[in-house]
């Protein structure tokens, strides 16, 4: 099985086990984002968003949300939770009641996602 492979110069193997469209209409400028979930050869799951939020606190440096878990569902839930925390920290609803504009986000390079 792929988890047991031991290959020269390979420190880790991951496989994509899920891709989800997450709709956040009224929050995201285009309504949705994608989250990909990967499982690594140790059995840990990790999730990544395709949207990077430009950090107002760090000269608009783009940061995506990441989440980890023992299951695919846990990683998905943690990724979305962490995205919401990042969103609230950088663009609080009180200051941005209409949601984000396209200037507040950056999409991950399509070839990377």
Image (cartoon, rainbow, N blue to C red):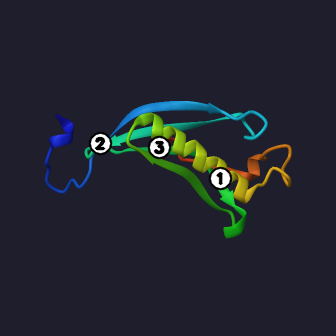
Comparing 46 with 64, the one in front is 46
**12 over 32 or under it: above or below:** below
The residue beneath circle 3 is 47
**66 over 24 or under it: above or below:** below
Residue 6 drawn at (x, y percent): 13, 48
Q: Residue furthest bottom?
A: 58
- What distance separates the C-alpha of mark 2 from that of mark 1? 26 Å
Residue 110 drawn at (x, y percent): 52, 41
Comparing 109 with 86, the one in front is 86
In what element is the residue under mark 1? helix
Number of residues whose C-alpha sits closer than 10 Å to that of mark 2, classed few (under 14), some (14–19) or many (20 or more): few
Give the label, 3 or 2, closer to the camera: 2
Which of the 4 image quarters holds residue 56? bottom right
Residue 108 drawn at (x, y percent): 55, 47
The earlier-in-sequence mark between 3 and 1 is 3
**37 over 59 or under it: above or below:** above
Q: Which mark is residue 43?
A: 2
Q: Is residue 49 visible?
A: no
Give the label, 3 or 1, closer to the camera: 1
Residue 26 drawn at (x, y percent): 79, 36
Number of residues whose C-alpha sits closer than 10 Å to that of mark 3, classed few (under 14), some (14–19) or many (20 or more): many
Q: Is residue 44 visible?
A: yes
Q: Which mark is residue 50?
A: none
Which residue sits at x=46%, y=39%? 74
The earlier-in-sequence mark between 2 and 1 is 2
Q: Give the quarter of the figure containing the N terminus.
A: top left
Which residue sits at x=77%, y=47%? 100
Comparing 106 with 41, the one in front is 41
The residue beneath circle 1 is 85
Which residue sits at x=59%, y=45%? 81
| Direction from residue 50 to residue 39 in the image, left or right | left
In what element is the residue under mark 3? strand
């Amino acid at each position: 099985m792929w988890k047991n492979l031991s290959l020269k110069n390979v420190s880790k193997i991951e496989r994509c086990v899920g891709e989800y469209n997450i709709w956040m209409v009224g929050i995201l400028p285009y309504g949705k984002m994608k989250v990909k979930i990967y499982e690594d050869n140790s059995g840990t799951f990790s999730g990544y968003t395709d949207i990077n939020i430009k950090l107002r606190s760090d000269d608009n440096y783009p940061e995506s949300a990441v989440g980890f878990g023992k299951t695919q569902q846990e990683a998905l839930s943690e990724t979305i939770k962490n995205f919401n925390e990042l969103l609230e920290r950088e663009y609080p609803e009180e200051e941005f009641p209409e949601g984000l504009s396209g200037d507040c986000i950056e999409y991950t390079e399509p070839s990377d996602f």
